[in-house]
Image (tube, helix red, strand yellow):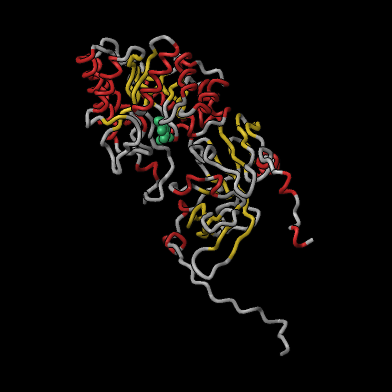
Amino acid sequence: MVKDKGKKPYLKPVIKKVSFADTGKFKSEHLKTPASKIIENLSVQNLISDYGSPLYVVAESTLRRSYRELAQAFTGRYPRTTIAYSYKTNYLSAICAILHQEGAWAEVVSGFEYEIAGRLGVPGRMIIFNGPYKKPEEMKRAFIDGAAVNLDSLDELKTAGEVARALGRKVKVGIRVNMQLNYPVWDKFGFSYERGEALEICRQIKKHRYLQLAGLHCHAGTYIIDLGIYRRVIENLTTLAINIKKELKLDMEYLDIGGGYPSRNSLHTQLMPGYTIAPPIEQYAETICSVINRKSGDFKNPPRLILEPGRSVVDECMHLLTTVVAVKERSSGNRAVIVDAGVNLLSASTYYRYEMASDRNSSEAMEEVDIYGALCMQIDVLRKSVRLPVVKTGDIITISKVGAYNFTQSMQFIYPRPAVVLLNEGKAAIIRRKEKYEDIKGPEIIPARLLKHVPAKQK
Ligand SMILES: Cc1ncc(COP(=O)(O)O)c(C=O)c1O
Protein backbone atom coordinates (compact mmCIF):
# COMPACT_ATOMS: atom_id res chain seq x y z
CA MET A 1 0.00 0.00 0.00
CA VAL A 2 1.34 3.43 -0.94
CA LYS A 3 1.46 5.72 2.06
CA ASP A 4 0.01 9.20 1.76
CA LYS A 5 3.03 11.21 2.90
CA GLY A 6 1.01 14.36 3.53
CA LYS A 7 -1.36 12.70 6.00
CA LYS A 8 -0.75 12.99 9.74
CA PRO A 9 -1.03 9.77 11.82
CA TYR A 10 -4.41 9.35 13.55
CA LEU A 11 -4.43 10.24 17.21
CA LYS A 12 -7.36 9.36 19.43
CA PRO A 13 -9.12 12.60 20.47
CA VAL A 14 -8.40 13.76 24.00
CA ILE A 15 -11.22 14.91 26.27
CA LYS A 16 -9.98 17.57 28.67
CA LYS A 17 -11.75 19.03 31.65
CA VAL A 18 -12.02 22.82 31.20
CA SER A 19 -11.98 24.62 34.51
CA PHE A 20 -14.53 27.42 35.11
CA ALA A 21 -11.55 29.56 35.92
CA ASP A 22 -10.60 29.51 32.22
CA THR A 23 -13.95 30.32 30.70
CA GLY A 24 -15.88 33.49 29.78
CA LYS A 25 -16.91 35.66 32.69
CA PHE A 26 -15.43 33.14 35.15
CA LYS A 27 -11.97 33.65 33.67
CA SER A 28 -10.17 34.83 36.69
CA GLU A 29 -6.83 36.59 36.85
CA HIS A 30 -6.28 35.74 40.50
CA LEU A 31 -6.21 32.04 39.65
CA LYS A 32 -3.13 32.56 37.55
CA THR A 33 -0.02 31.41 39.34
CA PRO A 34 2.53 34.24 39.38
CA ALA A 35 5.75 33.27 37.60
CA SER A 36 8.58 32.25 39.87
CA LYS A 37 11.65 33.84 38.32
CA ILE A 38 13.43 35.37 41.29
CA ILE A 39 14.09 34.11 44.81
CA GLU A 40 15.87 36.40 47.26
CA ASN A 41 16.91 38.67 44.36
CA LEU A 42 18.49 35.78 42.46
CA SER A 43 17.24 34.44 39.16
CA VAL A 44 16.15 30.80 39.28
CA GLN A 45 17.62 30.35 35.80
CA ASN A 46 21.04 31.55 36.94
CA LEU A 47 20.86 29.39 40.07
CA ILE A 48 20.16 26.31 37.96
CA SER A 49 22.89 27.11 35.46
CA ASP A 50 25.41 27.76 38.28
CA TYR A 51 24.56 24.82 40.56
CA GLY A 52 22.69 22.33 38.37
CA SER A 53 19.14 21.01 38.38
CA PRO A 54 17.40 19.94 40.52
CA LEU A 55 18.49 22.27 43.30
CA TYR A 56 17.38 22.90 46.88
CA VAL A 57 17.57 26.58 47.84
CA VAL A 58 17.23 28.06 51.33
CA ALA A 59 16.16 31.68 51.84
CA GLU A 60 17.99 32.78 54.99
CA SER A 61 15.84 35.84 55.71
CA THR A 62 12.66 33.73 55.57
CA LEU A 63 14.13 31.21 58.00
CA ARG A 64 15.08 33.94 60.44
CA ARG A 65 11.65 35.58 60.09
CA SER A 66 9.76 32.33 60.72
CA TYR A 67 11.81 31.70 63.85
CA ARG A 68 11.41 35.24 65.16
CA GLU A 69 7.66 35.27 64.65
CA LEU A 70 7.28 32.09 66.68
CA ALA A 71 9.74 33.09 69.39
CA GLN A 72 8.26 36.58 69.83
CA ALA A 73 4.69 35.25 70.03
CA PHE A 74 5.66 33.08 73.00
CA THR A 75 8.32 35.09 74.84
CA GLY A 76 6.04 38.15 74.70
CA ARG A 77 3.46 36.19 76.69
CA TYR A 78 5.67 33.95 78.82
CA PRO A 79 9.27 35.21 79.03
CA ARG A 80 10.62 31.91 80.38
CA THR A 81 10.01 30.28 76.98
CA THR A 82 12.79 28.41 75.20
CA ILE A 83 12.63 27.24 71.60
CA ALA A 84 14.49 23.97 70.98
CA TYR A 85 14.55 23.43 67.23
CA SER A 86 13.63 19.88 66.23
CA TYR A 87 16.76 18.76 64.36
CA LYS A 88 15.16 15.86 62.55
CA THR A 89 13.00 18.27 60.56
CA ASN A 90 16.09 19.51 58.73
CA TYR A 91 19.56 19.10 60.18
CA LEU A 92 21.55 20.80 57.45
CA SER A 93 24.29 22.36 59.54
CA ALA A 94 23.85 25.85 58.06
CA ILE A 95 20.14 25.81 58.92
CA CYS A 96 20.79 24.69 62.50
CA ALA A 97 23.58 27.28 62.83
CA ILE A 98 21.26 30.10 61.71
CA LEU A 99 18.63 29.03 64.24
CA HIS A 100 21.22 28.82 67.01
CA GLN A 101 22.35 32.35 66.11
CA GLU A 102 18.72 33.36 66.62
CA GLY A 103 18.81 31.80 70.09
CA ALA A 104 17.35 28.34 69.51
CA TRP A 105 18.37 25.32 71.56
CA ALA A 106 18.70 21.92 69.87
CA GLU A 107 16.12 19.14 70.22
CA VAL A 108 17.77 15.88 69.15
CA VAL A 109 16.51 12.31 68.98
CA SER A 110 19.66 10.27 68.38
CA GLY A 111 23.38 10.19 69.11
CA PHE A 112 23.94 11.28 65.50
CA GLU A 113 21.81 14.41 65.89
CA TYR A 114 23.46 15.06 69.26
CA GLU A 115 26.83 14.97 67.50
CA ILE A 116 25.63 17.50 64.89
CA ALA A 117 24.67 19.88 67.70
CA GLY A 118 27.99 19.23 69.47
CA ARG A 119 29.99 20.00 66.33
CA LEU A 120 28.06 23.25 65.94
CA GLY A 121 29.22 24.20 69.42
CA VAL A 122 25.83 23.95 71.14
CA PRO A 123 26.54 23.46 74.86
CA GLY A 124 24.91 20.45 76.53
CA ARG A 125 22.73 22.64 78.74
CA MET A 126 21.05 23.84 75.52
CA ILE A 127 20.29 20.35 74.19
CA ILE A 128 17.05 18.41 74.73
CA PHE A 129 17.57 14.69 74.12
CA ASN A 130 14.33 12.88 73.18
CA GLY A 131 13.60 9.82 71.08
CA PRO A 132 12.68 6.29 72.11
CA TYR A 133 16.20 4.81 71.86
CA LYS A 134 19.18 6.37 73.57
CA LYS A 135 22.25 4.17 73.83
CA PRO A 136 24.04 4.04 77.21
CA GLU A 137 27.12 5.83 75.85
CA GLU A 138 24.88 8.55 74.38
CA MET A 139 23.08 9.01 77.69
CA LYS A 140 26.43 9.18 79.45
CA ARG A 141 27.59 11.98 77.16
CA ALA A 142 24.31 13.85 77.67
CA PHE A 143 24.46 13.51 81.48
CA ILE A 144 28.07 14.70 81.59
CA ASP A 145 27.17 17.68 79.34
CA GLY A 146 24.11 18.56 81.44
CA ALA A 147 21.61 18.06 78.57
CA ALA A 148 17.90 17.52 79.33
CA VAL A 149 17.29 13.80 78.82
CA ASN A 150 13.61 12.87 78.52
CA LEU A 151 13.04 9.17 79.25
CA ASP A 152 10.64 7.33 77.00
CA SER A 153 10.19 3.87 78.60
CA LEU A 154 10.88 1.73 81.66
CA ASP A 155 13.81 0.26 79.76
CA GLU A 156 15.31 3.73 79.35
CA LEU A 157 14.69 4.43 83.04
CA LYS A 158 16.74 1.33 83.85
CA THR A 159 19.54 2.32 81.44
CA ALA A 160 19.61 5.87 82.84
CA GLY A 161 19.92 4.50 86.39
CA GLU A 162 22.80 2.23 85.39
CA VAL A 163 24.63 4.98 83.52
CA ALA A 164 24.24 7.39 86.46
CA ARG A 165 25.42 4.75 88.93
CA ALA A 166 28.52 4.13 86.79
CA LEU A 167 29.14 7.91 86.78
CA GLY A 168 28.83 7.76 90.57
CA ARG A 169 26.50 10.73 90.89
CA LYS A 170 22.89 11.81 90.72
CA VAL A 171 21.74 13.06 87.30
CA LYS A 172 18.65 14.98 86.19
CA VAL A 173 16.09 13.37 83.88
CA GLY A 174 12.70 14.27 82.45
CA ILE A 175 9.93 11.93 81.37
CA ARG A 176 7.88 11.83 78.19
CA VAL A 177 4.14 11.75 78.76
CA ASN A 178 1.43 10.67 76.30
CA MET A 179 -2.22 11.70 76.45
CA GLN A 180 -5.54 10.78 74.84
CA LEU A 181 -5.76 13.86 72.64
CA ASN A 182 -6.32 12.91 69.05
CA TYR A 183 -7.42 10.07 66.86
CA PRO A 184 -5.50 7.90 66.21
CA VAL A 185 -3.96 8.43 69.64
CA TRP A 186 -0.25 9.29 69.74
CA ASP A 187 0.70 6.86 72.49
CA LYS A 188 3.95 5.51 71.13
CA PHE A 189 6.04 7.82 73.24
CA GLY A 190 6.46 7.99 76.97
CA PHE A 191 4.10 7.13 79.81
CA SER A 192 0.33 7.41 79.87
CA TYR A 193 -1.14 10.42 81.65
CA GLU A 194 -4.68 9.09 81.95
CA ARG A 195 -3.69 5.65 83.24
CA GLY A 196 -1.53 7.19 85.93
CA GLU A 197 1.69 5.65 84.54
CA ALA A 198 3.36 9.03 84.30
CA LEU A 199 2.85 9.86 88.01
CA GLU A 200 3.91 6.35 88.98
CA ILE A 201 7.21 6.71 87.07
CA CYS A 202 7.79 10.03 88.83
CA ARG A 203 7.37 8.22 92.18
CA GLN A 204 9.94 5.62 91.08
CA ILE A 205 12.41 8.31 90.03
CA LYS A 206 11.92 10.13 93.33
CA LYS A 207 13.01 6.96 95.15
CA HIS A 208 15.98 6.38 92.85
CA ARG A 209 19.42 6.88 94.33
CA TYR A 210 20.99 8.23 91.14
CA LEU A 211 18.14 9.97 89.31
CA GLN A 212 16.42 13.28 89.95
CA LEU A 213 13.23 14.31 88.15
CA ALA A 214 13.58 17.71 86.48
CA GLY A 215 10.92 18.00 83.78
CA LEU A 216 7.89 16.77 81.87
CA HIS A 217 7.57 16.45 78.11
CA CYS A 218 4.68 15.81 75.72
CA HIS A 219 4.75 15.96 71.92
CA ALA A 220 1.13 15.60 70.86
CA GLY A 221 1.36 15.22 67.08
CA THR A 222 2.18 17.20 63.99
CA TYR A 223 0.45 19.89 61.88
CA ILE A 224 -2.02 20.34 64.74
CA ILE A 225 -4.64 22.95 63.85
CA ASP A 226 -6.89 22.28 66.84
CA LEU A 227 -5.83 24.68 69.58
CA GLY A 228 -7.83 22.60 72.06
CA ILE A 229 -5.16 19.90 71.84
CA TYR A 230 -2.47 22.30 73.06
CA ARG A 231 -4.79 23.59 75.77
CA ARG A 232 -5.25 20.06 77.09
CA VAL A 233 -1.53 19.24 76.85
CA ILE A 234 -0.51 22.23 78.92
CA GLU A 235 -3.43 21.81 81.35
CA ASN A 236 -2.45 18.18 81.91
CA LEU A 237 1.29 18.86 82.18
CA THR A 238 0.77 21.65 84.71
CA THR A 239 -1.69 19.51 86.70
CA LEU A 240 0.85 16.67 86.76
CA ALA A 241 3.58 19.09 87.84
CA ILE A 242 1.38 20.42 90.65
CA ASN A 243 0.55 16.87 91.81
CA ILE A 244 4.26 16.01 91.78
CA LYS A 245 4.95 19.07 93.90
CA LYS A 246 2.23 18.20 96.40
CA GLU A 247 3.00 14.50 96.70
CA LEU A 248 6.74 14.28 96.00
CA LYS A 249 7.79 17.77 97.07
CA LEU A 250 9.55 18.31 93.73
CA ASP A 251 9.49 21.45 91.57
CA MET A 252 9.59 20.83 87.83
CA GLU A 253 12.30 22.90 86.17
CA TYR A 254 10.70 22.62 82.73
CA LEU A 255 7.48 21.74 80.96
CA ASP A 256 8.16 20.79 77.35
CA ILE A 257 5.15 20.77 75.03
CA GLY A 258 6.95 19.50 71.92
CA GLY A 259 6.30 20.64 68.38
CA GLY A 260 3.40 20.18 65.98
CA TYR A 261 2.60 23.78 64.96
CA PRO A 262 1.59 23.84 61.29
CA SER A 263 3.44 25.62 58.52
CA ARG A 264 1.75 27.58 55.72
CA ASN A 265 1.56 24.48 53.52
CA SER A 266 -1.69 22.71 52.62
CA LEU A 267 -2.53 19.06 53.16
CA HIS A 268 -4.04 17.01 50.32
CA THR A 269 -7.06 16.50 52.59
CA GLN A 270 -7.71 20.25 52.94
CA LEU A 271 -10.08 21.82 50.45
CA MET A 272 -8.86 25.34 51.22
CA PRO A 273 -5.22 26.47 51.40
CA GLY A 274 -3.71 25.42 54.74
CA TYR A 275 -2.81 29.00 55.75
CA THR A 276 -6.48 29.97 55.64
CA ILE A 277 -7.38 27.14 58.02
CA ALA A 278 -4.50 27.00 60.52
CA PRO A 279 -4.72 29.57 63.33
CA PRO A 280 -1.97 32.21 63.43
CA ILE A 281 0.95 31.42 65.74
CA GLU A 282 -0.18 34.11 68.20
CA GLN A 283 -3.27 32.02 68.96
CA TYR A 284 -1.11 29.00 69.81
CA ALA A 285 1.00 31.20 72.05
CA GLU A 286 -2.08 32.72 73.71
CA THR A 287 -3.66 29.30 74.31
CA ILE A 288 -0.54 27.77 75.85
CA CYS A 289 0.81 30.77 77.74
CA SER A 290 -2.53 31.77 79.27
CA VAL A 291 -2.76 28.37 80.98
CA ILE A 292 0.80 28.35 82.27
CA ASN A 293 0.54 31.99 83.41
CA ARG A 294 -2.69 31.21 85.26
CA LYS A 295 -1.09 28.27 87.05
CA SER A 296 2.37 29.72 87.62
CA GLY A 297 1.39 30.84 91.15
CA ASP A 298 1.30 27.15 92.08
CA PHE A 299 5.04 26.80 91.47
CA LYS A 300 7.84 28.09 93.67
CA ASN A 301 9.75 29.10 90.53
CA PRO A 302 7.78 29.32 87.27
CA PRO A 303 8.97 26.41 85.09
CA ARG A 304 10.76 26.95 81.80
CA LEU A 305 8.33 26.40 78.93
CA ILE A 306 10.07 24.51 76.13
CA LEU A 307 8.74 24.25 72.56
CA GLU A 308 10.22 21.96 69.95
CA PRO A 309 8.98 23.35 66.62
CA GLY A 310 10.03 21.76 63.37
CA ARG A 311 7.91 22.36 60.29
CA SER A 312 6.54 25.71 61.46
CA VAL A 313 10.07 27.12 61.54
CA VAL A 314 11.76 25.49 58.60
CA ASP A 315 9.14 24.63 55.94
CA GLU A 316 8.76 28.07 54.43
CA CYS A 317 12.40 28.94 53.78
CA MET A 318 13.35 26.11 51.45
CA HIS A 319 12.35 25.47 47.83
CA LEU A 320 13.14 22.79 45.31
CA LEU A 321 13.94 24.03 41.81
CA THR A 322 13.43 21.45 39.12
CA THR A 323 13.48 21.47 35.31
CA VAL A 324 10.83 20.07 32.98
CA VAL A 325 12.46 17.28 30.97
CA ALA A 326 9.41 16.01 29.06
CA VAL A 327 5.75 16.87 28.44
CA LYS A 328 3.36 14.18 27.26
CA GLU A 329 -0.16 14.16 25.89
CA ARG A 330 -2.27 11.44 27.41
CA SER A 331 -5.45 9.84 26.24
CA SER A 332 -7.18 10.89 29.45
CA GLY A 333 -6.84 13.65 31.97
CA ASN A 334 -4.17 16.29 32.21
CA ARG A 335 -0.95 16.42 30.25
CA ALA A 336 1.90 14.71 32.09
CA VAL A 337 4.91 16.85 32.96
CA ILE A 338 8.12 15.03 33.89
CA VAL A 339 10.62 17.00 35.97
CA ASP A 340 14.14 16.06 37.00
CA ALA A 341 13.38 15.79 40.76
CA GLY A 342 11.49 12.84 42.22
CA VAL A 343 9.69 11.79 45.39
CA ASN A 344 13.09 10.68 46.71
CA LEU A 345 13.74 14.43 47.22
CA LEU A 346 10.20 15.32 48.27
CA SER A 347 8.84 12.64 50.59
CA ALA A 348 6.36 15.03 52.21
CA SER A 349 4.51 15.32 48.88
CA THR A 350 2.56 12.25 50.02
CA TYR A 351 0.65 14.48 52.46
CA TYR A 352 1.37 18.07 51.36
CA ARG A 353 -0.21 19.63 48.26
CA TYR A 354 2.89 21.65 47.44
CA GLU A 355 2.61 25.01 45.71
CA MET A 356 4.31 24.95 42.33
CA ALA A 357 5.05 27.78 39.91
CA SER A 358 6.97 27.90 36.66
CA ASP A 359 9.33 30.60 35.42
CA ARG A 360 7.02 31.20 32.46
CA ASN A 361 4.87 34.36 32.52
CA SER A 362 1.33 33.64 33.62
CA SER A 363 -0.15 35.99 31.02
CA GLU A 364 0.13 33.02 28.68
CA ALA A 365 -2.61 30.37 28.54
CA MET A 366 -2.95 28.23 31.65
CA GLU A 367 -3.46 24.49 31.86
CA GLU A 368 -3.87 21.90 34.57
CA VAL A 369 -1.08 19.33 34.50
CA ASP A 370 0.10 16.37 36.57
CA ILE A 371 3.71 16.63 37.72
CA TYR A 372 5.78 13.45 37.82
CA GLY A 373 9.35 12.92 38.92
CA ALA A 374 12.11 11.37 36.83
CA LEU A 375 12.31 8.09 38.77
CA CYS A 376 11.39 5.02 36.76
CA MET A 377 8.65 4.25 39.29
CA GLN A 378 4.89 4.58 38.95
CA ILE A 379 4.66 6.05 42.46
CA ASP A 380 6.81 9.03 41.52
CA VAL A 381 4.00 11.61 41.46
CA LEU A 382 4.85 15.03 42.87
CA ARG A 383 1.42 16.57 42.38
CA LYS A 384 -1.76 15.99 40.46
CA SER A 385 -3.67 18.85 38.87
CA VAL A 386 -1.54 21.91 39.25
CA ARG A 387 -2.38 25.03 37.22
CA LEU A 388 0.58 26.38 35.30
CA PRO A 389 1.12 28.46 32.15
CA VAL A 390 1.20 25.96 29.26
CA VAL A 391 4.27 23.92 30.11
CA LYS A 392 7.23 23.38 27.80
CA THR A 393 10.37 21.30 28.17
CA GLY A 394 13.07 23.39 29.81
CA ASP A 395 10.72 25.38 32.05
CA ILE A 396 11.92 25.67 35.63
CA ILE A 397 9.36 24.74 38.28
CA THR A 398 9.74 26.09 41.81
CA ILE A 399 8.24 23.77 44.41
CA SER A 400 7.77 26.00 47.45
CA LYS A 401 8.05 25.56 51.21
CA VAL A 402 9.75 22.19 51.20
CA GLY A 403 12.04 22.76 54.22
CA ALA A 404 10.54 20.25 56.64
CA TYR A 405 11.43 16.56 56.53
CA ASN A 406 12.19 16.39 52.79
CA PHE A 407 15.92 16.90 52.97
CA THR A 408 16.45 14.73 56.06
CA GLN A 409 14.31 11.96 54.54
CA SER A 410 15.75 12.31 51.03
CA MET A 411 17.64 9.42 49.56
CA GLN A 412 19.96 8.70 46.71
CA PHE A 413 17.55 6.54 44.81
CA ILE A 414 18.60 6.02 41.19
CA TYR A 415 20.21 9.50 41.16
CA PRO A 416 22.68 11.16 43.56
CA ARG A 417 21.21 14.04 45.54
CA PRO A 418 21.47 17.65 44.33
CA ALA A 419 23.28 20.58 45.89
CA VAL A 420 21.72 22.85 48.53
CA VAL A 421 22.46 26.57 48.35
CA LEU A 422 21.81 29.28 50.90
CA LEU A 423 20.49 32.57 49.53
CA ASN A 424 21.23 35.72 51.45
CA GLU A 425 21.21 39.36 50.38
CA GLY A 426 21.42 38.53 46.69
CA LYS A 427 24.26 36.02 47.08
CA ALA A 428 24.22 32.23 46.92
CA ALA A 429 26.53 29.94 48.90
CA ILE A 430 26.71 26.16 48.66
CA ILE A 431 25.83 24.59 52.02
CA ARG A 432 25.85 21.02 50.69
CA ARG A 433 27.61 20.12 47.50
CA LYS A 434 26.02 17.99 44.82
CA GLU A 435 26.67 14.32 45.50
CA LYS A 436 29.08 12.30 43.38
CA TYR A 437 28.66 8.65 42.40
CA GLU A 438 31.47 7.90 44.85
CA ASP A 439 29.36 9.27 47.73
CA ILE A 440 26.88 6.47 47.08
CA LYS A 441 29.07 3.58 46.01
CA GLY A 442 32.14 4.49 48.10
CA PRO A 443 31.21 2.56 51.28
CA GLU A 444 30.60 -0.70 49.38
CA ILE A 445 33.07 -3.58 49.33
CA ILE A 446 32.84 -6.24 46.69
CA PRO A 447 34.39 -9.66 47.55
CA ALA A 448 37.13 -10.53 45.04
CA ARG A 449 35.42 -13.78 44.04
CA LEU A 450 32.49 -11.78 42.65
CA LEU A 451 34.71 -9.84 40.28
CA LYS A 452 34.82 -12.69 37.78
CA HIS A 453 31.97 -11.61 35.59
CA VAL A 454 31.81 -14.51 33.12
CA PRO A 455 30.11 -17.59 34.53
CA ALA A 456 32.41 -20.69 34.24
CA LYS A 457 30.03 -22.57 31.92
CA GLN A 458 30.07 -19.85 29.28
CA LYS A 459 33.89 -19.74 28.94
C1 LIG B 1 9.67 14.90 70.08
C2 LIG B 1 9.40 15.76 68.90
N1 LIG B 1 9.50 17.09 69.03
C3 LIG B 1 9.28 17.92 67.99
C4 LIG B 1 8.94 17.44 66.74
C5 LIG B 1 8.70 18.42 65.62
O1 LIG B 1 7.40 18.33 65.14
P1 LIG B 1 6.82 19.39 64.09
O2 LIG B 1 7.68 19.34 62.87
O3 LIG B 1 5.44 18.89 63.82
O4 LIG B 1 6.83 20.71 64.75
C6 LIG B 1 8.82 16.06 66.56
C7 LIG B 1 8.44 15.51 65.25
O5 LIG B 1 7.92 14.45 65.07
C8 LIG B 1 9.06 15.19 67.67
O6 LIG B 1 8.98 13.86 67.55
- Depth order, front residue of 221/402: 221
**Image quarter hosting the N terminus:** bottom right
What percent of the width, then of the height, locates residue 359? Answer: 60, 49
Q: Nearer the viewer, residue 211 or 361?
A: 211
The quadrant of the picture occupied by the C terminus is bottom right
On screen, residue 124 versus residue 305, left or right, reads right
Image vertical order of residue 10 relative to residue 143, above or below: below
Q: Residue at x 72, y 47 (%)?
A: 449
Whole-percent x and y of residue 403? 51, 37
Report whether 458 appears left or right of 115.
right
Identity of the residue drawn at 58% across and 51% down: 361
161 on left or right of 45: left
The picture quadrant where one finds residue 448 is: top right
Q: Is residue 201 visible?
A: yes
- Give ligand 1's quarter of the image: top left
Please, which residue is most extreme toward the front here?
457
Q: Position of residue 107 (x, y in %)?
A: 45, 25
Q: Is residue 400 above or below residue 155?
A: below
Note whether residue 291 is visible: no
Q: Quadrant of residue 288?
A: top left
Can you give x and y, in whole percent of width and height, for residue 217 in the image? 34, 25
Is 93 left, or right, of 126 in this rendering? right
Farthest right residue?
Answer: 459
Q: How many marks?
A: 0
Judging depth in this view, the residue of 77 and 449 nearest the camera is 449
Along the line of sight, which residue is nearer the eye, 9 or 431?
A: 431
